[in-house]
Amino acid sequence: MKRILGLVATLTVALSLATPAPASPPSSASAQWGEPEFFATRVRWAGHLHTTSTMTYYGGAVQTAPAVYISWWGPEWSTGFSTGSYTSTQAISYTTDFFNNVGGSSWENITSQYCQGVAMGTVTCGSSGTHIQNATGQLNGTWNDPTAVPASPTQSDVANAALRLMQHFGYSANATYFVYTPSGKSMSGFGTSWCAWHAVASSASGPLAYAYMPYQPDAGSSCGANFVNSTNNAYGNGYFDGFSVVGGHEYAEAETDPRPSSSLYAWKDSGGNEIGDKCAWISSSTNVTLGSHAYAVQPLWSNSNSGCVTSY
């Protein structure tokens, strides 16, 4: 996910501070910390050139046994709220069902072609290196963090929520710790510039890969509402499309580039795009069936197919 300029970091989190060059580390390898990697809204992304350059390995770790932990941050999630005729309980169900069932799917399998432990500059892992696995049951835990959410949380607030989530469940270098905030309480820039972001924070146990997901329906179509499903159904398809499109985007990028610091890049293309960026907000986004429900997803970039695909 590429950085959106003009947003000032308030937290020690890692990101790409320079455009990486193929087959070698970025020139700013000494720069360790900066802004998160933001996923731009549909309006901000409009006109962006979806490059056809391959993803290249820069030497960093991937998540070889991916896992998800979710923090429903704020007492609002336990007391309940409603927007657009849907409840927070339905939003939780849609999201947890998505992550509960994405493992083992042909969509998630796209990430399995990427690996670690190969030469920098590699574009095809083949049978070499340690690949990202596509096991079932990747959602390892959810927790309602009762800590009050500020009206407009900062990056530092989000990172602290991620650290609380890690302390609750334990540390895993293969996990992405997702922080969800309730309706009406999101970091500045949500819905106007970006929809979500992922980053890495330092912890006593090691680098912590985490992602921030504001309440996507608050941004409407800018962050994926009805992006794939033009009408809403009882389960939330349509209205909740953004939760799976944006959440899937963040997860795939965290798997293939979990520590987006200039000295820790894993897989990016020559323009700094991650696996989701290269296929963001394109018309071939579609529904995939996971468990007993359909979920809107975007394609992901496949080096093997030299293009954006929704299965592998």
Image: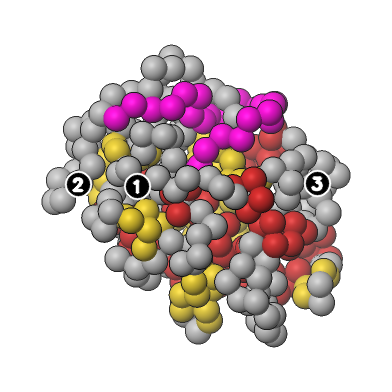
Q: Nearer the viewer, mark 1 or mark 3?
A: 1
For the question of whether residue 171 can be seen, the reply is no
Q: Residue at x 61, y 67 (%)?
A: 227
Please name the residue that numbered disc 2 is placed on: 125
Residue type of the residue flagged with mark 2: Cys
Distance from the alpha carbon under mark 1 to that under mark 3: 41 Å
Q: Name the residue furthest top.
A: 30
Residue type of the residue flagged with mark 1: Thr
Please name the residue that numbered disc 1 is placed on: 52
Q: Nearer the viewer, residue 141 or 157?
A: 157
* Tag 2 and tag 1, C-beta contact below 8 Å: no
The spot of residue 141 in percent (x, y) is 55, 60
Q: Is residue 196 above or below residue 237?
A: above
Q: Tag 2's secondary structure?
A: loop
Q: Residue at x 68, y 80 (%)?
A: 231
Q: Tag 1's secondary structure?
A: loop
The spot of residue 97 in percent (x, y) is 55, 72
Q: Residue at x 70, y 62 (%)?
A: 221
Circle on res. 149: 3
Per the image, is 17 magenta?
A: yes
Pick whichever of labels 1 and 3 is earlier in the sequence: 1
**Magenta span:** 1-22
Q: Residues within 10 Å of mark 3 (few under 14, many from 20)?
A: some
Circle on res. 170: none
Residue type of the residue flagged with mark 3: Val
The spot of residue 269 in percent (x, y) is 36, 38
Location of the C terminus by quadrant is: bottom left
Horizontal relation, residue 52 to residue 11: left or right? left
Distance from the alpha carbon under mark 2 to that under mark 3: 43 Å
